[in-house]
Image: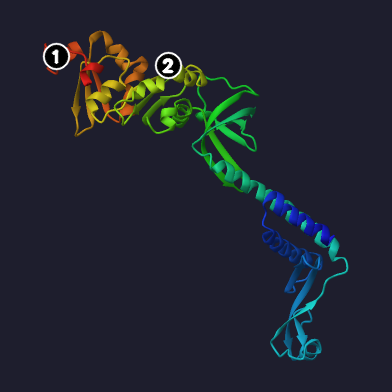
């Protein structure tokens, strides 16, 4: 049995990446526990596992005394010196007490240890592999659903897609293949747990990195994302090189790049705007597709009053205030939108100030 055990240990080290020394150390501890349990002994014992000799031996550790009171814990000076004349009082001597049927006990203990360590090692490998994928996009297949989660097979592990991380407008069916954003990887007592999302802004960011080479290569930067998953998103982009058109790069020829992302998100509308350090320009851009006449900035309160043409007011605010809400979240500025007529009545806009702040204005 011993040779088979050591062959198995060597195999596990080679194939599963489990350190042989860790396995042997765990095996020794398990054998001590098994010996004490099977032989109802509280004796201080040591198990010596020798790979070179192919043996497993049990030794009782006894203290050398003048007069023995406990035969399990003590040995007389005479008996000790029969073993080795150099032993003295209070020395600790090891006496082999390997039972005849210890091989059977060892086999059971070894099986438990190996099974446990293999499970732990496999969990460790899976955790290491998926921990590196945190904040990344992965493709999985929906395996099952319950009232709390949709379980997505990511290859070696099942990930959890919570109800709050799903896109409200999407329907999820068993065996569907979907792209998900890995939000968190945890190593728990039950093994690695992976949490994923379809509604996280990070999914949008990663999809743009995958579709737009200029973003992946760092030529174009994603500055900010605001998202109401399944309905509409805004993303601001910037290119340090003035020769590069960051918005055009993201849209792609005939809109192919952004359309691929829209398709992946099942029709979610995406507004791509150019980032600017000037809040007047940035807020105006962020309210796209609405035209803007003027932006009044309050630096102290980090708020803006945006004046738009009367006929563009509902477009600027958006359905249920969505366009203004996403623009505010995208820019980090509070946005109060007023029509041109109201702005003039309140003295915020002079009669002659009706020029739209379009792209040519900012050049």
- Relative to 168, 87 lies left or right: right
Q: How far across and down, in percent of the image, does residue 188 sit? A: 59, 47
Is 247 placed above or below 2 here?
A: above
Q: Residues within 10 Å of mark 1 (few under 14, many from 20)?
A: few
Furthest residue to the top?
311
- Circles 1, 2 touching at the beta carbon (< 8 Å): no
Can residue 68 be seen at all in this image of the molecule? no
Along the line of sight, which residue is nearer the eye, 66 or 133?
133
Residue 68 drawn at (x, y percent): 77, 87
Residue name at image x 67 percent, y 54 percent:
18
In front here: 341 or 39? 341
Percent from the top left, x then y, of residue 129?
A: 58, 43
- Image height of 110 relative to 168, above or below: below
Residue drawn at 80 percent across, 86 percent down: 83
On the image, the x and y values in percent for residue 345 come to: 14, 13
Give left or right: position of 37 versus 280: right
Looking at the rendered structure, which numbered label has been put on residue 253? 2
Of the pair 218 and 187, the residue shown nearer to us: 218
Residue 281: name its quadrant.
top left
**Residue sitting nearer the eye, 46 or 124:** 124
- CA separation in Å, label 1 and label 2: 36 Å
Please tell me whether mark 1 sits on a helix, a strand or a loop: loop
Q: Quadrant of residue 218?
A: top left
Residue behind mark 1: 353
Tell me, yes or no, if residue 228 can be seen here.
yes
Q: Is residue 93 left or right of residue 145?
A: right
Q: Name the outermost residue toward the right.
A: 100
Q: Quadrant of the N terminus?
A: bottom right
């Amino acid at each position: 049995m011993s040779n088979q055990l050591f062959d198995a240990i060597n195999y596990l080290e080679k194939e599963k990446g489990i350190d042989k020394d860790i396995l042997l150390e765990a095996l020794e501890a398990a054998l001590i526990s098994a010996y004490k349990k099977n032989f109802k002994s509280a004796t201080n014992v040591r198990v010596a596992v020798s790979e070179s000799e192919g043996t497993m031996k049990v030794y009782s550790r006894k203290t050398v005394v003048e007069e023995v009171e406990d035969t399990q814990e003590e040995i007389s000076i005479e008996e000790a010196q029969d073993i080795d004349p150099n032993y003295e009082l209070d020395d600790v001597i090891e006496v082999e007490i390997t039972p005849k049927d210890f091989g059977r006990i060892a086999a059971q203990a070894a099986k438990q240890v190996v099974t446990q360590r293999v499970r732990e090692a496999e969990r460790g490998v899976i955790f290491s592999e998926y921990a590196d994928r945190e904040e990344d996009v992965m493709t999985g297949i929906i395996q099952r659903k319950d009232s709390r989660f949709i379980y997505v097979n990511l290859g070696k592990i099942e990930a959890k897609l919570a109800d709050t991380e799903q896109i409200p407008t999407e329907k999820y069916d068993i065996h569907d293949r979907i792209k998900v954003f890995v939000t968190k990887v945890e190593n728990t007592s039950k093994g690695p747990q992976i949490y994923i999302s379809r509604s996280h802004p990070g999914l949008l960011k990663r999809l743009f990195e995958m579709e737009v080479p200029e973003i992946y290569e760092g030529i174009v930067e994603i500055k900010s994302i605001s998202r109401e998953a399944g309905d509409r998103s805004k993303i601001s982009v910037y290119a340090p090189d003035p020769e590069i058109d960051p918005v055009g790069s993201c849209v792609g020829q005939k809109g192919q790049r952004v359309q691929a992302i829209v398709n992946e998100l099942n029709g979610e509308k995406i507004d791509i705007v150019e980032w600017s350090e000037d809040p007047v320009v940035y807020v105006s851009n962020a309210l796209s597709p609405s035209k803007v006449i003027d932006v009044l900035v309050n630096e102290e309160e980090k708020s803006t009053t945006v004046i738009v043409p009367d006929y563009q007011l509902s477009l600027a605010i958006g359905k249920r205030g969505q366009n203004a809400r996403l623009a505010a979240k995208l820019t980090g500025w509070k946005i109060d939108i007023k029509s041109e007529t109201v702005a003039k009545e309140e003295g915020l806009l002079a009669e002659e100030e009706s020029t739209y702040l379009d792209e040519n204005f900012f050049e």
